[in-house]
Amino acid sequence: MTIDINVISEKDRNSVLHPFTQLKDFATGKIGDPTIVETGKGIRIRDAHGNELIDGFAGLYCVNVGYGRTEVSEAIARQAHRLAYYHSYAAHTTDELAILSDRLVKMAPGKMSKVFYGLSGSDANETNAKLVWYYNNLRGKPTKKTIISRERGYHGCSVISGSMTGMSFYHDHMDLPLPQIVHTGVPHHYWGANPGETEAEFSARRAAELDQLIETLGPDNVGAFIAEPVLGTGGITPPPEGYWAAIQAVLNKHDVLLIADEVITGFGRTGSMFGSQRYGMEPDLVTIAKGLTSAYFPLSASIVGEKIYRVMEEGADRVGAFSHGYTYSGHPIGAAAANAVLDIVETEDLPGNAHQVGAYFQAQLKDRFAQFPIVGEVRGVGLMGAIEFVGDREGKKRFDPSLKVGPRVSKAARDRGLIARAMPHGDILGFAPPLVTTKAEIDDIISIAESAVRSVM
Ligand code: PLP
């Protein structure tokens, strides 16, 4: 299909309300025309001007199997021809949905029982919060409702999930966070540790702070702790040594549920199928989205632990039907897409690829960037990584934000054919390429990134 770029740009500027876009700068043309993305193949996308870009961020950490996988698009088309839609209310199902749910319960971390479906990571976290409240109401602990999340955690931007997100710019002018959501410290050793404090000591301190917070709120008032196994949008930061064991002990002590938000880390990104497995977490609820369908179709899910589900089933005679669900919960096209994607994840061992190619990627990031005078920290795990730029390496001081070092490096990379994301909270260049990325493609990503970083030094 040939498109008229000017016509599309004008229609877009006049009618699309773009997320995370400075509205006036876009409306007045200050930030240029929209990028019209037309096609994708493997780890690359192509825009309407014919420019090819390596997608070093897999869309938004989601196109894990890469673009243009006909196994997935054909599964979607087959399902659309056969049965485009039916709901899953009142015990209706489809073969794809039942098969997918059985797979997810078996592969998920922790002792899981059932899968509830939504369409986005945000709504799945919204569901998980409601499940925490429902569970505690049904088991006669109606005050156990506060949910603790972490500063710089990202859990979405709907009302509850946006409250869980620990970044003030998601709250400002939107009347968030809700009072039921409380935040605790982020486990980022580079910025948060005291001088000389080891990772294990720092982890123990963060766990002691959580313990103290629960004591202060009252254990009878705290329902759950939600966290990403590896902090994602808040800076692509793997947990410091011993963090998850120490946190898990505090949660067990106070009968506080663990919600593992695996929206980014699920389905292989860290080199294990789930981040929870890699870090020995024992979640009661697991949030999945993105990699579940590699974003070929919007689908998310809350995987519900045995402990919670038992209480829900036992309470059913008292409270009646489980009154929560969306028109599109368990959409058959989404389920067909997910089954086709999971086939690829399993047969091509994408967690294994993320482990092996990821180890190479992490080594390259360290070798090529850690010594640069403007680099404070290089970090990551599997196929997610970050370079953090600082104005004063010895004194550990950030650049003045007005210098926009992170955005400038990201733009320089893009001008050279690589999408790598400028992350919030400092000057951070983030990478999360598709899980099918090869070593040779990592070489391409690294050499473009290196040229981009040098261009701003
Ligand atoms: N949770 C995590 C860890 C995420 O990274 C995201 C999105 O980036 C979400 C939840 C929200 O997902 P969605 O944008 O599909 O609502």
Image (cartoon, rainbow, N blue to C red):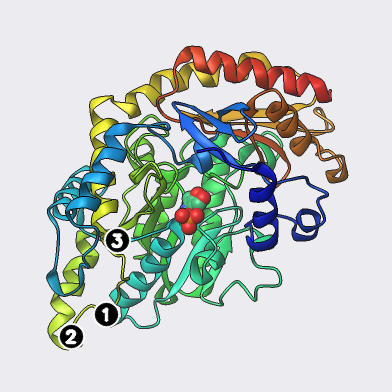
Quadrant in which the C terminus appears? top right
Where is residue 382? Give x, y as percent.
45, 28
Identified at 52% across, 33% down, the residue is 432
For the residues labelled 1 and 2, the Cα–Cα distance comes to 8 Å
Mark sitting earlier along the chain (3/2): 3
Where is residue 97? Give x, y as percent.
18, 54
Identified at 76% across, 19% down, the residue is 372
Where is residue 346? Give x, y as percent.
24, 31
For the residues labelled 3 and 1, the Cα–Cα distance comes to 14 Å
Find disc 3 in the rendering and name its residue: 117
Quarter of image, res 264:
top left
Mark sitting earlier along the chain (3/1): 3
Residues 424 and 133: in front is: 424
> In the rendered structure, which amino acid carries the disc numbered 2?
Gly
Quarter of image, res 455:
top right
Left or right position of 182 against 353: right
Where is residue 398? Give x, y as percent.
80, 39
Mark 3 residue's CB less than 8 Å from ligand 1: no
Find disc 2 in the rendering and name its residue: 320
The reply to whether residue 454 is in sight is yes
> In the rendered structure, which amino acid carries the disc numbered 3?
Tyr
